[in-house]
Amino acid sequence: MQGRRTMQTRGEMMRHWRLVNRMAKTTDTDLVSAFKDGRLSSDAWAGMVEACRGCAWSDTCADWLDGHDHVDTAPRPCCNRARFAALRTGSKVEA
């Protein structure tokens, strides 16, 4: 069938929720405080998890996190790298 698109497989929701939270901890990004301060809405937080679910690097992410206790920024392949950086500097992240 010409013109037919294949949907990208999404990963399991809770696995990616954990990856987002582990990356936040590793980068000293306080998602809970950002949420309480209004810099991270529930939609934006869910969007970070959803982005992670579709990230091509997510299969490598857990292994990378296992080898890093603390870093200043998320690694380049992380689809949420800019969001973590923005939240760390006190910026608001939109959905």
Image (cartoon, rainbow, N blue to C red):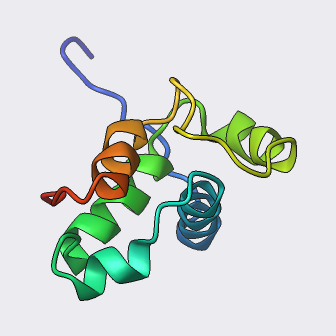
Whole-percent x, y for residue 51 in the image = 37, 48
Position of residue 16 in the picture relative to residue 8 (left or right): right
Quarter of the image containing the C terminus? bottom left
Give the residue at x 59% y 31%: 57
Across and down, in percent, residue 45 comes to 32, 69
- Judging depth in this view, the residue of 5 and 92 nearest the camera is 92
What residue is rendered at 37% in x and 55% in y?
88
Q: Nearer the viewer, residue 1 or 95?
A: 95
Q: Name the residue at 22% across, 11% down.
A: 2
Residue 94 located left or right of residue 74: left
Q: Quadrant of residue 90?
A: bottom left
Front-most of residues 34 and 44: 34
In the picture provided, is 53 more to the left or to the right than 58? Answer: left
Image point 44% across, 43% down: which residue? 54
Looking at the image, the residue that sits furthest to the right is 67
Q: Nearer the viewer, residue 82 or 2?
A: 82
> Could you tell me which quadrant the N terminus lies in?
top left
* Whether residue 40 is situated above or below residue 79 in the rendered picture: below
> Up-down: is 64 above or below 4?
below
Quadrant of res 23: bottom right
Q: Give the answer, above or below, for where 12 lies relative to 70.
A: below
Q: Quadrant of residue 34?
A: bottom left
Q: Residue furthest bottom?
A: 36
Q: Give residue 25's position: percent from left, percent from top.
A: 61, 63
